[in-house]
Image: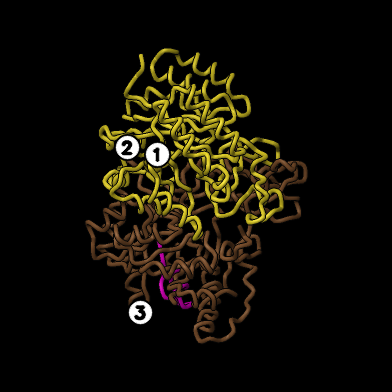
Chain colours: A brown, B yellow
Amino acid sequence: MELVCPAGTPSALRAALDAGADVVYVGFRDETNARNFPGLNFSPEELKEAVVLARGMGRQIYVAINTYPQAGNLSPWHKAVDRAAAIGVDAVILADIGLLDYAQKNHPGLRRHLSVQASASNPEAINFYRSAFDVQRVVLPRVLTVREIAALIGEIDVETEVFAFGGMCVMAEGRCSLSSYATGKSPNMLGVCSPASHVNYEQRRGKLVSKLGDFTINSFPDNEPAGYPTLCKGRFVGQSGDPSYLFEEPTSLNVMAMLPELIAAGVKALKIEGRQRGKAYVTQVVSSYRRALDAALRGEVVPLMDMGNVAEGARSTSGAYQKNWR
Amino acid sequence: MKNTASHLTLGPHLYNWPAEQKRDFYFRIADEAEVDVVYLGEVTCSKRAPFFLPFIPEICERLEAAGKEVVLSSLALVMTGRERKELHELSDDCPWDLEANDLSAVALLKGRSHVIGPFINIYNEGTLDYLYGNGARRIVLPCELPAESLRALGNMARGRELEVQVFGRLPLALSARCYHARAHNLSKDGCLYVCEKDPDGMDVMTLDGTPFLAVNGTHTMSYSVNSLAGELDALQKFGVSHFRLWPQQVDMVAVIQTFRQALDGQIDQIEVQERLDKLVDFAPFSNGFFHSVEGARMVE
């Protein structure tokens, strides 16, 4: 089983490789990838160097070009695919049907993976992408249970990659316009959800209130740490009248305890989320998962490791992999 | 005079109304509404589907007898074995055209006449053209597209049928999780169909009491009611052929009539808005996505 790890900077890339990543996935420094944050991501030159470095260690580089090209402005996405092909990366991770079509027609030899942002949640959809665009791997949306994943693998002839650790969409990935509704900036088109440019914190009578655009997302007593106002991890008031985490608590996905089940299910690759996170996060999460995965692959008991300090909200969940999450 | 190039459509009913009430809603649409196309079927939650299913053939016959085109809409997020089986049955046996709302349905309908629903991600010309080539005879665009995208896609459609959402709460997000059940401390499996309590969705307020969203089971809707009544001329110029109204618990026959008269140029912008303001009293209007600003905003 492959360990696929995030890097938002060349130094995070080196950290991931040193910590035992089999593959590092990165994005270009523009709206063509779903972590389009200021100061993050790779120039074409940096990507070239990354490929040389990874090859030298016998590892691989994938490039995420996984936002949806904007009508009338396709060229940044086409250029990104062309560049990734010219640099000779090991795979591109794509979501948009038009872009998959472009990549297949213009770079048939470039390996194509289907991004989680395409939200292909069943064999019919996955087999469609396989037969239409010859995708070699699908990154599964975080909506399926482990049992459903095992059953699905029996019905597709495409490799599967699943999310193991990190921030987690509670909505079907790539099928959510909540952030766009509040800020006018579409994550699907621009690659950033709950953008920092629209975040504000206001002090109100002993409380710190976090806002996204005009909407209050959460509020914290002065002595508590204030979390980032990711829209779907906020507190809202439903008809009960009591504030609650209506969609999801601020929490991180962590499937370490389920590694033996995922291996038995036939999953090909484990993905760590967090291209926006720093080097320390990458080092800790990747090295922990390297140890855990090696143990699980040897059939040993997976060592329990406390990941609380790097988890969002210092809490973790096995998320949709267990049915009671729904 | 009726503008025959502009068709009004009624999108599938997204909320959990009692099946008989929903049937009566469609009967009234068949008998009284000047709408060209009616979509129906369970899009939101497969658990709701069995209740309404027995009424569908009778409703479709009545709609067709009234001269309306009928399209059956498929589930927007297909995950379980049961959902897949039901989708296969629908695509194998359905005498009406289907609207594909998940890529699984797009796959099953390849090479056959079908409609692509608004839950399929279409952001650009390449995807639009690919899906027409796959057999789609009409494509309904996602709600968050700005005017520039709609214009470019209208160009690419080159006279092929293209539909835009112009009225109703917008479906903003889908999930495996049911937020209605969660809000009532229930599991999705044991949900007691609590979503039936909220015929237009459950209002979601921010901590300071600002209305924000509306939960409809596994779907999250806008709190505001989208209205592109003021943008119809622009949409017609872009090449949009079909205009979708989402059912809400308001007088939909009157909403349909208002949009029909607006498309036909029989009433002016001010009168359209006055009528809509009277018909919809449960939430404010918005049109922000069209204008490249927050979807929640109303740009005058």
Q: Is residue A143 magenta?
A: no
Distance from label 3 to label 2 (Cα)? 44 Å
Q: Could you tell me how far apart the alpha carbons at marks 1 and 2 are, in whole angstroms? A: 9 Å
Q: Place residue B285 in its image quadrant.
A: top right
The subunit carrying tag 2 is B
Q: Nearer the viewer, mark 3 or mark 2?
A: 2
Instruction: Report the amino acid beneath label 1.
Output: Leu
Q: Are marks 1 and 2 in contact (CB under 8 Å)?
A: yes
Q: CA distance from mark 1 to mark 3?
A: 44 Å
Q: Secondary structure at mark 1?
A: loop
Residue A213 is at least partly visible in this image: yes
Residue A231 in view in this figure: no
The quadrant holding residue A305 is bottom right
**Residue B34, placed above or below residue B87:** above
Q: Earlier in the sequence, mark 1 or mark 2?
A: 1
Residue A98 vs residue B244, the one in the foreground = B244
Who's the residue at 35% across and 39% down the image? B139
Q: Amino acid at mark 2?
A: Leu
Q: Residue at label 3? A: A58
Relative image position of residue B55 (x, y in whole percent): 52, 39
Residue type of the residue flagged with mark 3:
Gly
Give percent across and percent down for residue A143.
52, 59
Q: Residue at x 57, y 32 (%)?
A: B224
Left or right relative to B225: residue A324: right
According to the picture, the residue beneath numbered tag 2 turns out to be: B153
Tag shown at residue B141? 1
In front here: B64 or B173? Answer: B64
Residue sitting at 54 percent across and 47 percent down? B49
